[in-house]
Image: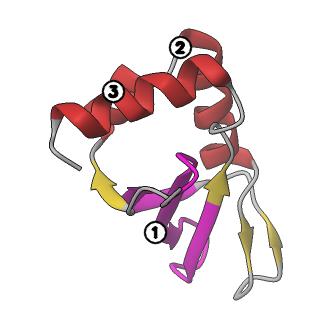
Amino acid sequence: MKRPEEIKINRFQLKVLLNDNQKEGFDYIVNHNVYCGNCGGTFNQGVEINGMVLDSLNDVRIEGACKNCQGKVARVIEFGEDKEYYQKAMDFRKSIGK
């Protein structure tokens, strides 16, 4: 079976896909748990998100800049293992023709 393609998503689309617990987890990760290779660590200042992708496993990849040093960062947040979320993501893909 062919995996779905990666698609860019915006914050509104992400908020529709996530339940309240997942939204809290996403916000925590973005603000407290992204490693910056330029700074050499994980910082509490968070990430300025420049783009998000729903990947082929229906996980969310964020790309942006470290708020501490403006270095490029990326983080995959694994939501695709949750069956309810996965189905919502697949329904979302159908609704936009992807």
Place of residue 87 in the rendered image (x, y in percent of width and height, measured from the top left) = 49, 24
Q: Which residue has dot 2 on it? A: 19
Residue drawn 53% across the image and 56% down it? 1
Residue ID for mark 3? 91
Q: Position of residue 80 (x, y in %)?
A: 63, 39
Please, what secondary structure does the residue beneath circle 3 have? helix
Q: Using residue 16 as the reference point, say whether residue 34 is left or right of it.
A: right
User: Residue lying farthest right?
Assistant: 41
Q: Residues within 10 Å of mark 3 (few under 14, many from 20)?
A: some
Using the numbered discs, state the Cα–Cα distance from disc 3 to disc 2 in whole angstroms: 15 Å
* Residue type for callout 2: Asn
Mark seen at residue 64:
1
Mark closer to the observer (3, 2): 3
- Residue under the point 76% across and 52% down: 33
The answer to which image quadrant residue 36 occupies is: bottom right
Q: Counting other residues with Cα less than 10 Å from the Cα at mark 1, is it few (<14), some (14-19), or many (20 or more)?
A: some
Q: Please provide percent x and percent y for residue 28.
A: 68, 35
Mark identifier at residue 35:
none
Name the image quarter holding residue 10. Answer: top left
Magenta span covers which residues? Answer: 47-75
Tell me if 89 is positioned left or right of 30 in this view.
Answer: left
Element at label 1: strand
Above or below residue 68? Residue 56 is above
In terms of depth relative to the viewer, which is nearer, 27 or 1? 1
Which mark is first along the chain, 2 or 1?
A: 2
Front-most of 81 and 71?
Answer: 81
